[in-house]
Amino acid sequence: MTDKQDDKGRELAVAAAKIAIERNCTDVTVMDLRGLSPATDYFVIATGTSDRQRRTVIDEISMHAKKAGHARFGQAGYEQGRWILVDFVNVVIHIFDEEYRKYYDLEMLWGDAKRLTVDS
């Protein structure tokens, strides 16, 4: 991966986290998985308060990513709205409800990953 691609991934991850924060998601985390995961470079994890809010956050992140030139590789969980995942290959967005976030505990699973600081 080139430095430019890595910068674009980091920029998308931070922008997605800022959107989640601006839309009142809680416990927003950006995890740097470079060197730890063969599948992606960054996870953005957040907790939303309702299925409608989680869908709105995903929609806004997807629009931002498209404008920034990121193609969406896949999406899951949108209809149920409890855990919505959007895959942009080098960045994967996870917007959970509180119960699913506690149950799946991705932060513990990827406990060796660095956390990026996101200024709101």
Image: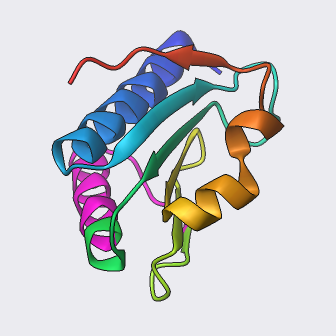
Residue 62 spot, x, y in % from top left: 32, 58
- In the picture, measured across the screen, residue 89 lies left or right of residue 59, that is right
- Camera-nearest residue between 48 and 9: 48
Regarding residue 73, the answer to whether it shows in the image is no
Q: Quadrant of residue 53?
A: bottom left
Q: Main secondary structure of the magenta part?
A: helix
Closer to the camera, 66 or 96?
Answer: 96
Query: Is residue 85 magenta-colored?
Result: no
In the rendered view, tell whether residue 55 sits above or below residue 70: below
Q: Position of residue 86 (x, y in %)?
A: 50, 60
Give the quadrant of residue 118.
top left
Q: Is residue 40 above or below residue 118?
A: below
**Vertical order, 103 against 44 (above or below):** below
Residue at image coords 31%, 44% = 69
- Find the magenta span and give its range: 55-74
The colour style of the image is: rainbow
At horizontal 71% and vertical 44% (from top left) the residue drawn is 106
Horizontal side, residue 8 vs residue 62: left or right? right
- Residue 103, given in percent of the width and then of the height, sits at 72, 60
